[in-house]
Amino acid sequence: MPANPARQTTEVLSNTDFDHRDLDWYIDRGVQILVFLGGISAIVFILGIFIFITKEGLGFILEDFSFREFLFSPTWRPTSELKETYGILALVAGTASVTGLAMLVAIPFSLGTAIFIAEFVDGKTREYLKVTVELLAAIPSVVWGFIGLSIMNPLIIDVFDVPVGLNVLNAGIILGLMAAPIMTSIAEDALKAVPDRYREAAEAMGATHWQVIYKVVLPAAKNGLLGAVLLGVGRGFGETMAVLMATGHSINIPTSVFDSVRALTATIAAELGETAVGSPHYQALFTIGVFLFVITFCINLTADLIVRGIRKE
Amino acid sequence: MVAAPQSPATAKLEVRDLAINYGTKQAVSDISLTIRENEIFGIIGPANAGKTSFLKAINRMEDFDTNMSVAGQILFDGVDTRQVRNVYGLRRRIGVVFPLPVGLPMTVYDNVALAPRLAGVRNKAELNVIVERCLHRAALWDEVKDRLNALGSLLSGGQQQRLTIARALSQEPDLLMLDEFSIAIDPVTTMRIEDVLKELRQEMTIILVTNLVQQARRIADRTAFFLEGSCVEIAPTEDLFTGEVSDQRTRDYVEGRFG
């Protein structure tokens, strides 16, 4: 019936039965359910992991656990013959000092690189730089650890004339260099997300290139930049292998950057394989896991609150 | 305001044989005109007539657009803008209002105080005076005086547009270029701003690009009609409307018989 398309349409419309669910309706509902499942699966997995590690560490929390000793004792001696002590203060100090130093290294490097890539170069150069930065981000952490162990270690001993080169300084620099590429990448995305019309408007007013960046682009991108920095902090807390290799792995509350320390993550990695499942030591390690989980959660929550706070203004 | 010594007493801007290309596509060709000190110079014409490109060239905006190339001369106070070494200094003397409002992502106050700050004004009281005066002139003060600390990018479209005007005025420019400043503003407010523009003529030269032929008639001293990248005709504005123009196309456009 090619004669009159208008009439055909009318027929289709008049045939519509509003009580009948057609294929489109079922497809739509099916897709809704699939997307919903995908959406909640992330939450389910996170909850599952949290429940698992809490359960493994629970016996320790309920029975042998002295909250004060765990948090405030600097002595981690889980295999002592006389008295086993599970204090993570020194480990927390180790992780925090290494992460702090890493951020001192990584923030200027990554923000500087991101600003350079996003605001000062164009076209080919920019693509090459981005690819290079992303390649750096793909270097496995054990390779970084190896660099710390075999290059940085003798270098630090030579340059600073200290007996041991595996220390906060070594691990901090290694971790900073490790975190910088991914931070650069995120920060660069944040800068690129600032619309060009802002730049043009400011330049049209006679702002110089640097004034545009400093007064307009950086403030507009501050949420993303903060995100990049917090991602780096998260990386610092969570990084295991490189830290294990470069810190010296000795339990110590550092008083200078030349002290060897041990990180929370490295402790789990080094000791978990040698403990009996279900023993207090095993459970203590899982409690460290819970502790790391809670810290990461707090960092992310803070980031989220800060970002929301900025948005509300 | 001192007239430029090199050129005939009243020329603020002299354009000679201007041609603008985007890649291989020609947007403006062969425009030569003179804009006098302290006049409101209207530019009318349909889309793609080259009006916005013309404004961009004056401000050396081609510097951001590698695709855009400009040939010919634009003399600002007798100085060739292509040869200017400190382009930032040049741009500070030229205020621009873009057709799409761009409230920068900072507070209303900071938006208007940005240009004075860039120029080195640090005194808080002085900044307050400038901000209030510019917002008044842009007919925005009453609406935002209680929320100067709100983000400029969160204002409504029309408010952002007036914020852009206030920002351009805060530069205290010699030359103010308005590109379709009223598309997001209601007629009553538009009239208020037009009155302000008429007063501002004492202090600066104004170029007004507009799609509203009647707006040009209301405030422009002289008006140019651009069509397809060239300037068809320049005449005292009233002449355009009383039919004393030489080109039939101008007459048709003004009377709405175009195309």
Image: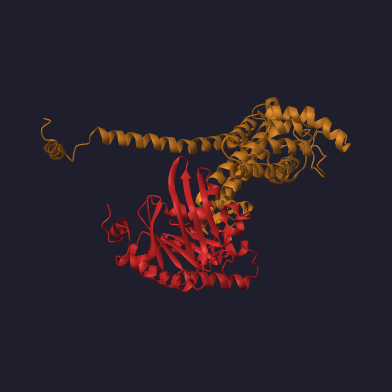
Chain colours: A orange, B red
**Image quarter (top left, top right, bottom left or bottom right) of the N terminus of chain A:** top left
Q: Quadrant of residue A100?
A: top right
Q: Nearer the viewer, residue B37 or A200?
A: B37
Q: Position of residue B13 (x, y in %)?
A: 51, 61
Spot occupied by residue A244 in the image (x, y as percentages of width and height): 73, 31
- Please indicate whether residue B150 sits to the left or right of residue B42 in the image: right
Answer whether residue B223 is visible to the viewer in this image. Answer: yes
Residue depicted at x 56% and y 69%: B3
Which quarter of the picture shows residue B161?
A: bottom left
Image height of A233 relative to A212, above or below: above
- B239 in relation to A209, above or below: below
How many numbered tags mark residues here?
Answer: 0
Residue A256 placement (x, y as % from top left): 82, 44
- Please provide percent x and percent y for residue B255: 27, 61
Residue closest to the eye, B152 or A283: B152
- Relative placement, left or right, of A59 versus B237 is right
- Whether residue B150 is visible, yes or no, is no
Q: Residue at x 25, y 57 (%)?
A: B257
Foreground residue among B111 and B20: B20
- Residue sitting nearer the eye, A268 or A114: A114
Measured along the vertical axis of the image, is residue A132 above or below residue A216? above
